[in-house]
Image (cartoon, grey):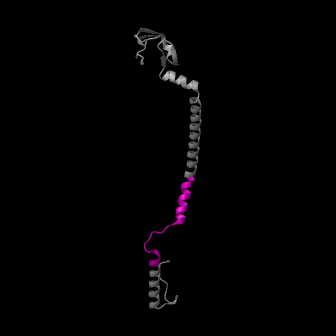
């Protein structure tokens, strides 16, 4: 029964002019403060942030730890590779497996072996020009290759 109007005589009646004037003042004051702008609710925003951090904080911690572990492993691998690649013996071994090569001179002597000497049985200069330079070189290999080797001069 809160919506029923009060009975006459229980409340002092105000004159109509005061009632309408007070209502007008109330309307203008509320219109001046609201101006139809959305109200920014800091308390509601804080509650949303607090609710989101309940599940977001552990997720961020796990992601940070995982990224740290991955970064640590990558740095360890990089350091190990750098250490191996700075070793001359390792580089020679890699070059020998990747593209073996061999350098020899006109007297059939091997000058530089970069992994190919294991495949060469014999090097012979079969024919020479009049000035002494080789015209024909014969190379015997230890095994047959599917792809013939590249011989350059």
| Residue nearer the viewer, 129 or 47 | 129
Where is residue 21? Give x, y as percent: 45, 87
Residue 81 in magenta?
no
Q: Residue at x 57, y 33 (%)?
A: 82
The answer to whether 127 appears left or right of 95 in the picture is: left
Residue 43 in magenta?
yes
Quadrant in which the C terminus appears: top left
State whether residue 4 is above or below residue 48.
below
Q: Residue at x 57, y 40 (%)?
A: 71
Where is residue 24? Give x, y as percent: 44, 84
State whether residue 107 is above or below residue 85.
above
Quarter occupied by residue 68: top right
Quarter occupied by residue 31: bottom left
Q: Residue furthest top?
A: 126
The answer to whether 134 appears left or right of 10 in the picture is: left
Q: Residue at x 54, y 58 (%)?
A: 49
Q: Residue at x 47, y 80 (%)?
A: 29
State whether residue 80 is above or below residue 27.
above
Where is residue 152? Give x, y as percent: 42, 19
Total marks shown come to 0
| Residue nearer the viewer, 87 or 39 | 87
State whether residue 32 is above or below residue 43.
below
Per the rendered image, the range of residues in magenta is 30-54
Where is residue 55? Give x, y as percent: 55, 51
| Residue nearer the viewer, 82 or 58 | 82
Q: Main secondary structure of the magenta part?
A: helix
């Amino acid at each position: 029964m809160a919506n029923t109007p009060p009975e006459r005589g229980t409340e002092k009646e105000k004159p109509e002019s005061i009632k309408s004037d007070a209502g007008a003042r109330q309307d203008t004051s509320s219109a001046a403060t609201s101006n139809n702008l959305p109200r920014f609710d800091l308390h509601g925003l804080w509650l949303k942030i607090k609710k989101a951090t309940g599940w977001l904080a552990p997720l961020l911690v796990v992601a940070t730890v995982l990224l740290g572990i991955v970064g640590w492993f990558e740095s360890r691998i990089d350091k190990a590779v750098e250490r191996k690649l700075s070793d001359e013996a390792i580089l020679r071994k890699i070059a020998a497996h990747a593209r073996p090569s061999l350098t020899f001179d006109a007297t059939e002597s091997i000058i530089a072996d970069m992994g190919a000497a294991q495949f060469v049985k014999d090097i012979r200069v079969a024919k020479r020009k009049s000035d002494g330079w080789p015209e024909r070189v014969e190379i015997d290999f230890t095994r047959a290759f599917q792809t013939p080797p590249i011989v350059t001069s």
